[in-house]
Image (cartoon, grey):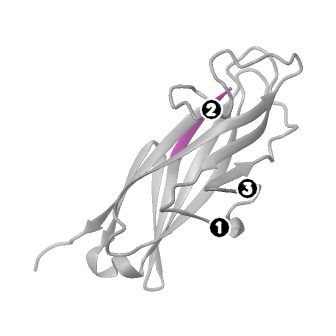
Amino acid sequence: LSLNKSITKVTLKYDNQEKEKDYAESKLAKVEIPARKISKSTIVIEYQLEVKNEGDIDAYVDEIVDYVPETLEYDIELNSGWYDYGNGKVKYTALSGNRIKPGESKVIKLYLTKEMSDSSVGVITNTAEITKSSNPNNAKDIDSVEGNRNENEDDYSEAQIIISIGTGAIT
């Protein structure tokens, strides 16, 4: 089983306005916030997590954990199927019991928010991992160890967002 995490949309909210920017399953996204609006802004990041069965037997993903960075917030109201696990972790178990056939993929969404301030710009890396899986043969994944946070394994994935100040044109 492999996990691929990407950013598919960022919504910027300020002054009773919403501006959305779509991304094509990007591993690196950038959002610019107008300088005068930054301390009154909120961003909502839509992450897509795609689980793929790369093996040759049916498999089940029983748990995915997202390691939420301290700079982002998890909101249960935005995230059906996700649960706060404590210590900066949220887990998704809604795929448990759903068979994923060889070559098949399942896609889930995760929404994280950030209340902006003048000092909250920069790069934020968000990671996730398959932490529990199973199959009818009780076979182990041949190229990954569940829950070990090894970034070189294909059951672990990350996406980054760059948040910057947009200065606009000088008049």
Residue 134 occupies quadrant: top right
SS class of the residue under badge 3? strand
Does label 2 or label 3 sit earlier along the sequence? Answer: 3
Does label 3 or label 1 sit earlier along the sequence? Answer: 1
Residue 57: image x %, image y %? 80, 16
CA gap, disc 1 to disc 2?
A: 26 Å
Q: Are marks 1 and 2 in contact (CB under 8 Å)?
A: no
Query: Which quarter of the image is occupied by the C terminus?
Result: bottom left
Question: Compared to 24, does 144 lie above or below?
Answer: above
Q: Residue at x 59, y 47 (%)?
A: 48
CA gap, disc 3 to disc 1?
A: 10 Å
* Category of crowding for the residue at label 1, using alpha-carbon neighbours closer than 10 angstroms: few (below 14), some (14–19), many (at least 20): some
Q: Name the residue beneath numbered marker 2.
A: 148
SS class of the residue under badge 1? loop
Residue 122 occupies quadrant: bottom left
Question: Compared to 29, does 146 lie above or below?
Answer: above
* Horizontal arrangement in the rendering, residue 72 relative to residue 40 (left or right): right
User: Which residues fall within the magenta stretch?
Assistant: 1-6
Question: Compared to 162, does 61 lie above or below?
Answer: above
Please tell me whether the stretch drawn in magenta is mainly helix, strand or loop.
strand
Residue 88: image x %, image y %? 61, 56
Q: Nearer the viewer, residue 5 or 16?
A: 5
* Horizontal arrangement in the rendering, residue 51 relative to residue 138 (left or right): left
Residue type at mark 2 is Asn
Q: Name the residue beneath numbered marker 1.
A: 75
